[in-house]
Image (tube, rainbow, N blue to C red):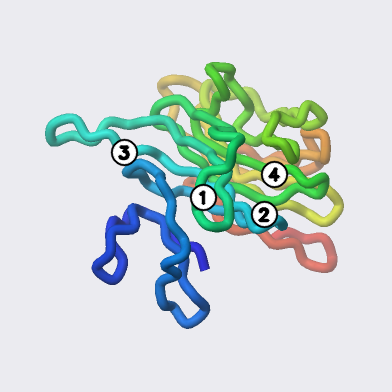
Amino acid sequence: ILIGGTFERMNGEIVNSLARLHPDGSPDTSFAHSLPPCRINQLLVLPDDQILCGFEPIKVEGNNIKPTGGVLVRMKADGSHDSTGILVQLVPGGNFTGLARAANGGVWVSSVRQSISGAQLNPLYRLDARGRLDPTFNAVFPRSLWLSVDGFFLQPDGRVICSIIRSKAADMPQSYGLVELDATGKPGRLSLPDLADNKVSAVAIQPDGKLL
């Protein structure tokens, strides 16, 4: 059992926000990582037992914590870093909101304030099995001054339903809604960008096709 968060110690031992437990809850001392002081946002175990870890490094200046950009890395099963290094580096203040396996061996990623090597991205993208951007998926979202994906829900037919947060103009408050994309990123039938007054955090589809 992998656990991540903002904790520094577990059972009195320094673990720096990420640890692994045995099924009975006891610490797995064979797991050791070398992450910097950080906040773990997302974890995903891959079929080969490697681990994707999305985290925000914590940088302290005086008495203040300075925002840094989220980082996505691939780790080996024992916690050591994979040779591929950093897969995604977000701009300051950015963090990861979702990770999921893709059918082609790649990985779905959603984030806030997203960029890779300085290039702006959509807030939902797909990486191939080698950690590179998958060019066959290009998400198309409603036009907004600022938009992030707070979470996403993969459907059996390849569709993706995204919980979005957006601002249509600098002087307008944020709005919250749901947007559906097909397997290539094109808009689907569902488009409710201004659905609610706060974020939508869970979605389920009933056998008759209705959304909960």
Q: For this rendering, which residue is in front, 41 or 204?
A: 41
Can residue 196 be seen here? The reply is no
Mark carried by residue 107: 4
Above or below residue 133? Residue 3 is below
Give the quadrant of residue 19.
bottom left
Give the residue displayed 48% in from the left and 46% down from the top: 197
- Estimate the x, y position of residue 124 in percent, counting from the top left: 64, 36
User: Type of residue at label 1?
Assistant: Gln
Residue 156 is left or right of residue 180, and the answer is: right
> Which is in the foreground here, disc 3 or disc 2?
2
**What element does badge 2 sit on?**
loop
User: Type of residue at label 4?
Assistant: Val
- Give the mark nearest the N terminus, 1 or 3: 1
- Give the mark nearest the N terminus, 4 or 3: 3
Residue 201 is left or right of residue 155, and the answer is: left
**What element does badge 1 sit on?**
strand
User: Type of residue at label 3?
Assistant: Ile
- Give the mark nearest the N terminus, 3 or 2: 2
Give the quadrant of residue 77.
bottom right
Inter-mark Cα distance, 2 to 1: 13 Å
Q: Which residue is mark 3?
A: 58
Q: Which residue is mark 2?
A: 46
Q: Which residue is mark 1?
A: 42
- The C terminus: image quadrant: bottom right
Inter-mark Cα distance, 4 to 2: 9 Å
Above or below residue 207? Residue 118 is above
Label 4–label 2 contact, CB within 8 A? yes
Give the residue displayed 53% in from the left and 17% down from the top: 118
> Which is in the foreground here, disc 4 or disc 2?
2
Can residue 105 be seen here? The reply is yes
